[in-house]
Each structure stands twice: as structure tokens, then as C-alpha cells.
Amino acid sequence: DGGITQSPKYLFRKEGQNVTLSCEQNLNHDAMYWYRQDPGQGLRLIYYSQIVNDFQKGDIAEGYSVSREKKESFPLTVTSAQKNPTAFYLCASRVPESNQPQHFGDGTRLSIL
Amino acid sequence: SQQGEEDPQALSIQEGENATMNCSYKTSINNLQWYRQNSGRGLVHLILIRSNEREKHSGRLRVTLDTSKKSSSLLITASRAADTASYFCATDISFFTNAGKSTFGDGTTLTVKP
């Protein structure tokens, strides 16, 4: 079955450490997105990519970085510059045309040690 | 501020009752989507309604869209305990000018008591 796989499910970060969250999709979607979700809140866009080797900042990109070297993969690095990284991170993808929904992975919960 | 805002923030009903959630938005849209999120999981797409549509159905779900009022509603009929989840609306402005970015509201948390 096609879908989006996020790993790990739980991740812990030490002070000053960078951590990378994985997102892989086999849906053949060109567009991919990273969202942050804080408790009781909606989704805020961190980064997005419409095509391989291209990506743009979303609303809350500071302290995060991404790469898009393959169509299937869109990893997110939470850097030490992100002072409040504790959150639920969701990856999504969609067909590059309007009127198609986004498909989501099951998320990674990041906590500070 | 968020493009989509859901109302109410929380809703608690008995099994068998209907649940209605509302979403308001600020700018003209291409489509509006409703998603469901179970605790600790990703979002699952429920229904997408285009700006030229007024109503869509899927099983026990009914979505309406009123573009003149910039609002949408999601009705879940004959609710079940398994419907307990958070429900989000998301709006698309224009894929080609907005890179397919959807704007999400803060969600409605639905609790269905057995």
C-alpha cells in the first residue's frame, strides 16, 4: 500500500544537539510538507518542497533545515538554534495540482532531555 | 492569524447523536478540506469540497460550503465512540500561486460518550 512513513515515532534531543526526522513517501507525489503541531493547536508549516532539489521556508522555518535530494524523501533537521523544539512533527505530500488532499504520515514526537 | 477557524473548540455528545462542527475562513478559496486526527496519529482526509460545490456526502459525513459567508460545516450523523477525535478544516487558496499550501485551523475536539 502507498503511504508516508515517518521515523522515528519518538525522539529525544539533548541541549546543543541537531536531530533529523525522516519522511519517506511512495505515492509518487512531487509536493511535500513539514508541519509542527503543539498541544491543542493546529498545524503550522515549517518547510515545503514542490520538486526535487527545491524547497521553500514556511511560516516557522527558523531553527529548522531540510533537503530534497530524492522525490521520495524529505528529511527535517531540528537544529540547536530551535530553542523550543518539543512538539509533534507531521510530514505530508500531495499531487501537484489543485483539489487534491494532502496525505499525512503518523508523526514524530520530539522531546527535550 | 489562521485562515481557518473551527467552532466549537470542544464538543461532547452521546453515542447516536449528531455532531456539527463549523469552520470559518477569511479569503477566497479554491477548496476546503476536512481532516480527522486520532490522538497521537497523523491526519486522515475525510472530504474535500470545491469552491463551486455547496454540499458533499460520504457515508455518515455531510459537508456544506457557503462561500458568501466564508464558512463550512461538517456534520457527523449517528455518532459512535470511535468518532472521538480532533477534526480540522484546511483551505487552499490557489495551488499555482501558493504551492499547494493549505492553511489549517486549530481544530474541534469531539468526544462521543458510549
Image: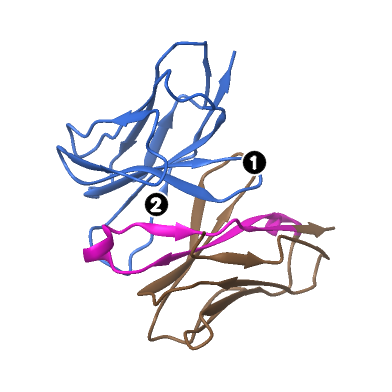
Chain colours: A blue, B brown
Tell me if B29 is positioned left or right of A50 in this view. Answer: right
- Report the side of B4 relative to A45 (left or right): right
**Residue B62 makes an appearance in the image:** no
Marking on residue A103: 2
Residue at position x 71%, y 66% in the image: B8
Q: Which residues are magenta?
A: B81-110
| Label 1 residue SS | loop
From the viewer's perspective, tell me whether residue B86 is left or right of residue A83: right
Q: Is residue A18 visible?
A: yes
* Residue B44 image position (x, y, % from top left): 50, 54
Image: A93 above or below A98 = above
The one of A9 and A34 positioned closer to us in this rendering: A34
Q: CA distance from mark 1 to mark 2?
A: 21 Å
Amino acid marked by disc 1: Pro
Q: Is residue B104 magenta?
A: yes
Up-down relation of residue B94 to residue A72 (above or below): below
The numbered mark 2 sits on a residue in which chain? A
Label 1, on which residue?
A: A39
Residue at image position (49%, 88%) is: B68
Quadrant in the picture for the C terminus of chain B: bottom right
In the rendered structure, the answer to whether residue B7 lies left or right of residue A105 reads right
